[in-house]
Amino acid sequence: MELRHLRYFVAVADHRHFGQAAEHLHISQPPLSHQIRQLERELGTVLLTRTTRRVELTEAGRAFYDDAVRILADVDAAAARVRTLAEGWTGRLRVGFTGSASYRQLPQVARLQRVHLPDIELQLFSEMLTPAQEQALVEQRLDIGVLRPPVGTPGLATRTIAVEQLTLAVPAGHRLATAPAPRLADLTGEVLLTYPGRARSVVRAAVEQELRRASAVVARTQEVEQTSSMMALVGAGLGVALVPDSARALRLDGVVHREIAGAPSVELALAWREDDTSAATRRFVRMLVDHLPTAPSEAA
């Protein structure tokens, strides 16, 4: 028994007429009649009674019809699932976000997914520094990273989606909270909150380089793992920080963000494995490049 036998039988049962069923199936009537007789011989029973004007289902035909309709529906649904999976419309993706991107870009990504790829399931990991994301991508614990280039791990493809100026985060009552046109040199003598050196943070490296150029000598540095914790410590008056502009989206009482002359910029990029064959990964990256507000226009 083949699927075509079921489709032919259901068509005849629905139309109650061989000629109309044959027209619906885009075949001639004799082959259709032959296929139905072949099906009946295989089942060892008559499914249809034929008259010159009409076709009726036998008791066996009525029972077989229900099963045939269910089987065909299941087959069609399975085929549709495979097609949508192969085309990248469905699937499950694990996406990591570095520090401040967890506050601005993560909500943007979630909204875009809901509108453009609602059948893709996302598992989101926030506050992951770039080296941790690179390792997770290589180890296939992440499918896509939203991180700070440069990426030094072989086998990863990247696409820049934003360039962010670093802003100065200070306590509300701090002297630089209201100072006109603060500069990097004004950070001399301050306690600087920064990401851990062992984490090879792109933001930390950029800050240290520009502070040296500005001859700014901070009193000391205090390492903080996460951007949210860093902003909380700023609000508590325990130091100042230079953070990507997207950290403004984390609104905390007692924290003032100031643009600062000479502050460096850092990039934000998508990263994924070059050998990732998932259609969902490719479609998701394409969607983000096309629709993120700060994404460049070139194709992924």
Image (tube, rainbow, N blue to C red):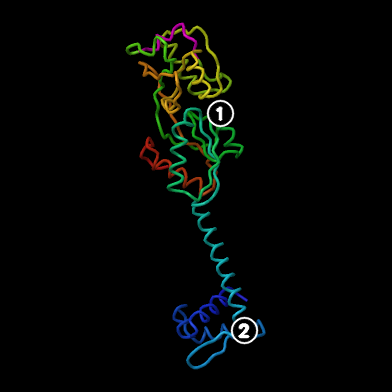
Kind of residue indicated by mark 1:
Pro
The residue carrying pointer 2 sits among few (fewer than 14), some (14 to 19) or many (20 or more) residues within 10 Å by Cα, namely few
Residue drawn where x is 49% and y is 93% of the image: 52
Q: In the rendered image of this protein, does residue 164 appear above or below residue 188?
A: below
Residue 38: image quadrant is: bottom right
Between 278 and 242, which is closer to the camera in this rendering?
242
Q: Horizontally, is 147 left or right of 178 in the view?
A: right
Residue 237: x percent and y percent? 48, 13
Q: Is residue 211 left or right of residue 181?
A: right
Which marked residue is nearer to the observer: mark 2 or mark 1?
A: 2
Question: Quadrant of residue 56 in the image?
Answer: bottom right
Residue 159: x percent and y percent?
44, 36
Give the residue at x 54% y 14%.
Answer: 222
In the image, what residue type sits under mark 2?
Glu
The question of residue 263 being in magenta is answered with no
SS label for mark 2: helix
- Residue at the outermost right position: 44
**Of helix, strand and loop, which one carries label 1?**
helix
What residue sits 54% from the left and 63% below the top? 77
The residues tagged by marks 2 and 1 sit, at their Cα atoms, a distance apart of 68 Å
> Residue tagged by mark 1?
131
- Magenta residues span 182-192
| Dot placed on the residue nearer the N-terminal end, 2 or 1 | 2
**Residue lying at 52% horizontally and 61% vertically, measured from the top left:** 80
View extreme (left): residue:
180
**Can you identify the residue that label 2 sits on?**
59
